[in-house]
Image (cartoon, helix red, strand yellow):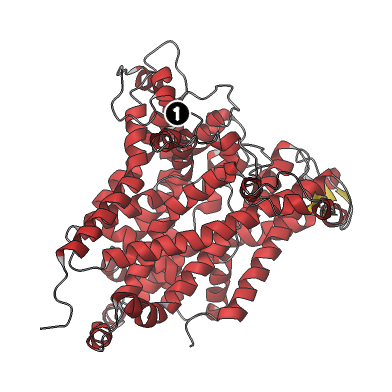
Amino acid sequence: MSAHSYSPPWRRGIGYALLIFFAVVFIGPFLIQLATSFKTDADAANNSLSLIPHPATLSAWERIFGFTENAGIPFGRWLTNSIIVATFITLGRVFLDSLAGYALARLRFPGRQAVFWGVLGILAVPGAVLLIPRFLVLKELTLFNTYPGMILPIVVDAAGIFLMRQFFVNIPTTMEEAARIDGAGVFRTYWSVILPMARPGLITLTILSFQGSWNEFQLFLVSTSDPKYNTLTTGLAKFSSGQLGAGTQYPLTLGAALLSTIPVAIVFFAFQRHFIGGQLAAAVKG
Amino acid sequence: MLPALAVLIIFLVVPIGLAFYVSLTRWDGLSSPFGGGAKFIGFDNYKSLLTVDNLTRQNFATSIRNNFYFVLFVVPLQTALALFLAVLLNNRFLRGRSYFRTAFFFPSVTSSIATTLVFLFLFSGGGAVNQLLGYVGLHGPNWTADSRGVFHQALGVVGVDSAPGWSQHEFFNLSWWDWFSGPSVAMVVIITLVVWTTSGTFMLMFLAGLQNINEEVLEASEVDGATAWQRFRLVTLPMLRPTLILVLTLGLISTWQVFDQIYLTGNNPATITPAYLSYNQSFQNSAFGIGAAIAFLLFALIILLAALQRRLVGTGEDD
């Protein structure tokens, strides 16, 4: 019997108390957010801690979905834009990151090591430094205020390339050699042999790409100025920091914020394992 | 490889070079900066941020001060909380740990804009936090609108209400009294928010590190009569050193770039940071040259701090 196979009940009691306390701290704000979205403006301001709306109203939700004259926010447009850019960015990253990752893991070409260090170097560039550079290039390429301008700058990401390289490095080379002996070319080998074997890696990449592009804020902020290109993040942020001329309508903004969280939440709860694996792989790169 | 490399070069490497050029000009962001739309002025933007006695330098100094206190509080707090949660979840006598792990990690995957909105609501004047404080008889401040420094208020408690004479001398257009203000009450909200959203990610890294620790070593030390605290301090912590260094490095780099949360609190001297000031000067004030110069000074600062940290504590891999 090992030395600590027993833990006294009082100690476990403290453990559970701490776990529950922190669960309330981490999840509580989302519950308050949910409850607030069903409150009136006055109730939200006066009883913000209460989880039971009194009186309960759907007015915030009716405004979010545009069912009333007084539609507060163009939520449908923001949602559509978020779906458009997140879809293209995710597809682009899955295709291009995996190709690049494969090349770095397998192909022998001059300067491969230099490219590898280059990718690592790009990972180290602080995002805050890129606000003006991205705006500059999009303006010069006349892509400012266009969908391609919101998509292209992040259609490949160094972290994704690195993640895929790690997956490919860990796949044994014997399968590829067999395919090559059978006469398959590089792309054919990649597509029919390697990609299917890298499926777990691809799922992780898809999920992290979706999450990253859905939550992206800084690029969309500097690549557009026309409200018709607002996504859920830029739309909500501009609306709340007063640029669209509305004050603090908490049930409306928190309801819209909640809706913008739901797609990522669903993916998170369905594929949590991949989130965790991806986070750790991303950490190792540092 | 080539398409990916092309995108990275076009949208990353070249832009950084162009932005450096812009930092040497006066440019309003409207015309093309390379076709005569920007006036080349050498290092004047950097001079105005660092050596000229003016409002620009005062704002820059304020943003550096704000960000410094932000880092000073967020990095230790998020690291300690993440480690604490990981150790708690690593206790194999507790059931349902995977559910709790999910709960603790969830804020990390959600949008920074959405979570900031929630926290601005929780910390509003009559918000949930002040109601909770009210239950224990405390009267909470009007958090996000309160620009008073936390250290100043602490000094107020012991009777120091105004700046002593020596502290009124200025350094970078900010009096010493203002440099030692501590984070503003409004910044405390952002500090709490960021600790809340990032601890989950770092907790996962610590959990992975904890799972690599040899159980037998821990058991041997227990047989030798070590208490739980001694086991943690003398066995677990030294073995977690590589993870600890990783978490501190990632934390240090990301906290110096805080932007999204600051954007939502607006152009407020109590919370502006260099990343936000760079955006504000460029996109809202049409002074792209100054904005770019701030971005490069921030870049230099981050590289310097990362290099310094590497020298002081190593990478954690080779020792």
Q: Residues within 10 Å of mark 1 (few under 14, many from 20)?
A: many
**Figure check: B13 above or below B259:** below
Residue B225 falls left or right of residue B40: left
Q: Does the image show residue A31? A: yes
| Residue found 24% across the figure and 60% down from its top | A15
**Figure check: B232 above or below B290:** below
Chain letter belonging to callout 1 = A
Name the residue tied to disc 1.
Answer: A253
Residue positioned most to the front: B159
| Residue found 35% across the figure and 48% down from its top | A26
Tally the numbered discs. Answer: 1
Residue B151 falls left or right of residue B238: right
Looking at the picture, how far across and down is residue A127, in whole percent? 58, 56
Q: Nearer the viewer, residue B219 or B55?
A: B219
Q: Nearer the viewer, residue B151 or B121?
A: B151
Q: Nearer the viewer, residue B77 or B272?
A: B77
Residue B208 lies in quadrant: bottom left
| Residue found 42% across the figure and 23% down from its top | A46
**Figure check: B30 above or below B167:** above
Q: Does the image show residue B3? A: no
Residue positioned most to the left: A1
Q: Secondary structure at mark 1?
A: helix
Looking at the picture, how far across and down is residue B76, in whole percent? 51, 63
| Residue found 46% across the figure and 37% down from its top | B138
Q: Nearer the viewer, residue A109 or B305?
A: B305
Residue A135 falls left or right of residue A7: right
Looking at the picture, how far across and down is residue A33, in whole percent? 37, 33
Q: Hey, what amino acid is under mark 1?
A: Thr
